[in-house]
Image: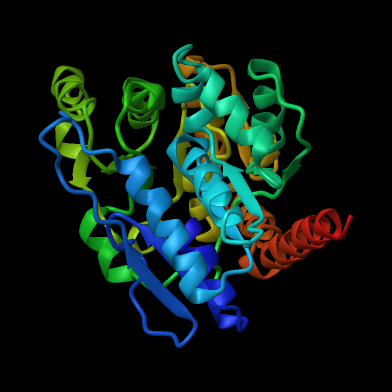
Amino acid sequence: MATELGKALAQEGHKVHFITYSQPSRLDFLNENLFYHEVDFRSYPLFEYPPYELALASKMVSVAMNEKLDLLHVHYAIPHASAAYMAKQILKTHGISMPVVTTLHGTDITLVGKDASYEPVVTFSINQSDGVTAVSEDLRKETYEHFKITNEIEVIPNFIDLEKFKKQKKDHFKKAICPNNEVLVVHTSNFRKVKRIGDVIKVFYNIHKEIPAKLLMIGDGPERVPAEQQCRELGIVDDVRFLGKLEAVEEVLSVADLFLMPSEKESFGLAALEAMACEVPVISSNTGGIPELNIQGVTGFLSNIGDVEEMSKNALYILDKAHLPKFKENALKRAKEFDISRILPLYEAYYQKVMDKAAANISV
């Protein structure tokens, strides 16, 4: 998301400098306003692990001074916000005031942030940021619940590029996967326990018992092998394909009829938004920020975590030929509300607000 945001800002005429330890995979085009700076962190004989945060802060200082940056926008509280705070203090000694915006995406709060050993750093980094955004109202609420945050957190949701994620003519692909006009169900994730991959297989098994269906599993991770074994035990292995990691997910989504997201936790549900942009309705859990995206009975259905039976029932309802076209239409309509052309101005306005506030503090 950070990469897509930077690219969109560059296309609007802003100069955007990416500071990371490796070039983002989606930073794949040339633009006169886009720049990339690699953080070089070498091994040190004294340390088992290289001090990345120090190297990152130093690189932030260097880029800010040499490129005359107006603002630092960091993603995730750990380690980027804390590194940005250090960089900000160093820049002050050079007479440079550098406002910092921190965006919370979820993992920093829901997983890493709750580790007691990180809590002081997370809290301090968020409170010392000049601006803080969260990708969903649920994440904003959870941050306030778990940390003593005094800063105001503004919700700016994730977005989708509808020029990239849209239904494409891939009839030959659909025919190859579903030669007998089976319905096509898709799931994509990093196959961690939180994604409840076993529930994906169970829901598909229940669908498969009622109507001819195929399942495509996109992604990879620790839960893949157990899921493959589960398919063998249920006797559906011939109708489930594990495709591994794919870059052009939109091509698969273009031929899908239903997207499954039974996750235990999602701060937003970006994969579901990508599916909806390709006119694919969603069966999901009702956790985290998903209800802010998936509208019950309109773009899909939401169920309690682990309620496989209800998810299966709702899936079959959507897949009924009398219902599916309307759900597909509604999914796209909802996705358009999160088009990058609508969200980008929110970031631009927020940047300006933070810079104006920082400038006012200096004058005082």
* Residue farthest to the bottom, as pictured: 32
Q: Quadrant of residue 346?
A: bottom right
Residue 57 is situated, as x and y percent measured from the top left of the image, at 42, 49
**Quarter of the image holding residue 344?**
bottom right
* For residue 68, side relative to residue 131 (left or right): left
177 to the left or right of 133: left
As drawn, 104 above or below 276:
above
Q: Name the spot of residue 233 as percent of width and height, x first.
A: 15, 17
Choose between 56 and 154: the one closer to the eye. 56
One can see residue 280 in this view? no
Please determine whether, in this image, residue 100 is positioned above or below residue 339. above
Task: State whether residue 15 is above or below residue 271.
Answer: below
Q: Residue at x 63, y 43 (%)?
A: 135
Color scheme of the displayed model: rainbow
Q: Is residue 123 visible?
A: yes
Identity of the residue drawn at 18% across and 21% down:
226
x and y percentages locating residue 284 in the rendered image: 53, 31
32 left or right of 158 in image: left
Q: Residue, x 24% and y 25% (percent of image)?
A: 223
- Say which of 317 and 230 sits in front: 230
| Name of the residue lying farthest toward the right | 364
At 51% from the left edge and 72% from the top edge, which residue is drawn?
16
Furthest residue in direction top, as rendered: 116
- Number of numbered discs present? 0
Q: Nearer the viewer, residue 250 or 216?
A: 250
Q: Quadrant of the C terminus?
A: bottom right
Q: Nearer the viewer, residue 307 or 164?
A: 164
Residue 29: horizontal and vertical position, in percent?
36, 80
